[in-house]
Amino acid sequence: MNTMSEDAGRMTGVFDFDPFAFVTSDTHFSHARISELAGRPFATVEEMDEALVARWNALVGPGDAVLHLGDLALGPITESLPITGRLNGRKFLVPGNHDRVSTATQTKTAIERFRPLYEEQGWTILPEILDGTRNGRRLRASHYPYRGDSQELERHQSKRPVDDGTPLIHGHTHARDRGGLGNQFHVGVDAFGYAPIPFTLIDDWLAGLAKGGA
C-alpha cells in the first residue's frame, strides 16, 4: 500500500486535497435503472458500464489520484465492484448512500463485511465528510450537498455536512448543471460527460470564490 493510501486509511484532522488530480461521483456502475432515472443516453447497463470505464481511462493515468464522492456501484456487488477494478489510478472513495460501506444505509457489521470487497478492487475508503485544504484554501467534500437532492425530499439530513460557509464539492443530486452553485460544486458524472473532472476546475472555482466571484 502506498504512503497516501496508508495516510488516508488512518486520516484524522485536516485532509490534504492537493495530491488529487481528478474528482467525480455517482457512476452507479451496474445500476440497471439509472439511465432511466437520471436520463443517461445508454441503451443497456452493459453499454453504460463500458462507456464509464472507457471515458475514465481516457483521462486518468495509472498514477493519478482520483477522489470519488460516492455511489460507486450497485447491483450484485460481487459483480459490479470488479468492473471498477478496471479503472486507472489510485482510487479513493467517500461513501454515498448507495455504497455498501455507507453509515447512512448500512450496519457496522455490513460495512466490515463489504469493505474488503472494495479494497480488493483498489479502493481506499475515506470518511464520509472530508474537511481540509486545496492549495492553501479551505475545502470540504461529501457525497451529500448542503442543499439539494435528486428527489423532492432532501434525504439523509443527519449525514449531510453543516453549511458554515466552507466551499463544498459533492455528488448525490445527478444535476446536469456545470460549475458551482454558491458555495457548493456538483462533480457528478451526469454533469460532466460521464467522466471524472480535473481538479483544476475546482481550483478555478475556489480562486473565484476567494475573489468574491460566482
Image (cartoon, rainbow, N blue to C red):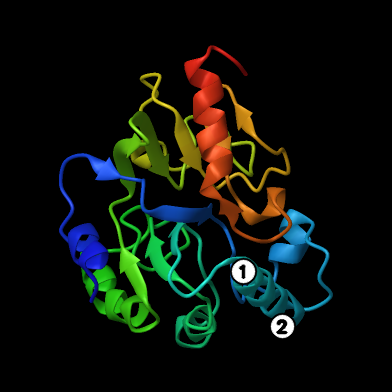
In this image, 54 relative to 95: left or right? right
Tell me the kind of residue under disc 1: Trp
Pinpoint residue 164: horizontal percent, then vertical percent. 36, 20
Pinpoint residue 182: horizontal percent, then vertical percent. 57, 21
Tell me the number on the disc at residue 46: 2
Q: Earlier in the sequence, mark 2 or mark 1?
A: 2
Q: Residue at x 28, y 52 (%)?
A: 127
Q: Determine the image quadrant of residue 108.
A: bottom left
Instruction: Tell me, yes or no, if residue 147 can be seen here.
Output: no
Tell me the number on the disc at residue 86: none
Tell me the kind of residue under disc 2: Glu
Instruction: Tell me, yes or no, if residue 19 can be seen here.
Output: yes
Q: Is residue 4 above or below residue 156?
A: below
Tell me the number on the disc at residue 56: 1
Q: Residue at x 38, y 68 (%)?
A: 100
> Neighbour class for label 2 at 10 Å: few (<14), some, many (≥20)?
some
In this image, 13 relative to 23: left or right? left
In this image, 166 relative to 207: left or right? left
- Quarter of the image where the C terminus is located: top right
Pinpoint residue 21: horizontal percent, then vertical percent. 48, 55
The answer to whether marks 2 and 1 mark residues whose Cβ atoms lie closer than 8 Å is no
Q: Residue at x 44, y 28 (%)?
A: 167
Q: Is residue 49 above or below residue 4?
A: below
Q: Residue at x 61, y 77 (%)?
A: 30
| Helix, strand or loop status at disc 2 | helix
Pinpoint residue 38: horizontal percent, then vertical percent. 73, 55
